[in-house]
Image: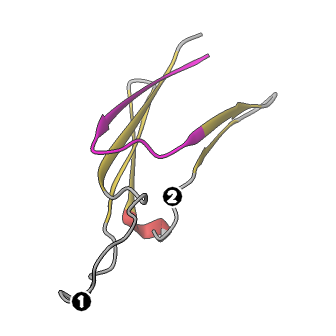
Amino acid sequence: MFRHSQRGKFKPPSDVIETDNKFIVLVEIAGMDADEFRLSLLNRKLVISGNRILPAIDANTSYHQVEIESGEFRLEYNHYT
């Protein structure tokens, strides 16, 4: 069983899947490359963190709708047997 906690500006959606011999963690974050994520494993805790930065927009541009979240995120997954 995994317990999830989150720190940071926003929480990207994620799934944790267990098979007979592995766990699969899927994190959905559009606009980021694999090398922009930080992964660490310490004391049975998986930590996925990063910073999604949206492209700069010209100063003369006006937003009419903003729904895409950006900023720092940190997902923590604790494994308990």
Judge left or right: residue 52 versus residue 81.
left
Residue 70 location in percent, x, y?
33, 58
Residue underneath mark 1 = 58
Which amino acid does the dot numbered 1 rest on? Answer: Asp
User: Which quadrant holds residue 57?
Assistant: bottom left
Residue 24 location in percent, x, y?
67, 41
Which mark is nearer the camera, 2 or 1?
Answer: 1
Which residue corresponds to the image point at 17% horizontal and 86% vertical from the top-left?
59
Task: Judge whether 34 appears above or below 43 on screen.
Answer: below
User: Mark 2 and mark 1: span between their CA atoms?
Assistant: 24 Å
The one of 9 and 45 positioned closer to us in this rendering: 9
Q: Is residue 8 a member of the stretch shown in magenta?
A: yes
Which amino acid does the dot numbered 2 rest on? Answer: Ile
Q: Which residue appears farthest toward the left when viewing the image?
A: 59
| Magenta residues, start to end | 1-14
Residue 76 location in percent, x, y?
40, 32
Quadrant containing the C terminus is: top right
How many labels sit on residues?
2
Residue 22 location in percent, x, y?
71, 35
Which residue corresponds to the image point at 24% horizontal and 89% vertical from the top-left?
58
Disc nearer the start of the sequence (2/1)? 2
Judge left or right: residue 50 versus residue 1.
left
Residue underneath mark 2 = 29
**CA neighbours of label 1 inside 10 A, class few (<14), some (14 to 19), many (20+):** few
Which residue corresponds to the image point at 35% horizontal and 44% vertical from the top-left?
10
Q: Which residue appears farthest toward the top when viewing the image?
A: 81
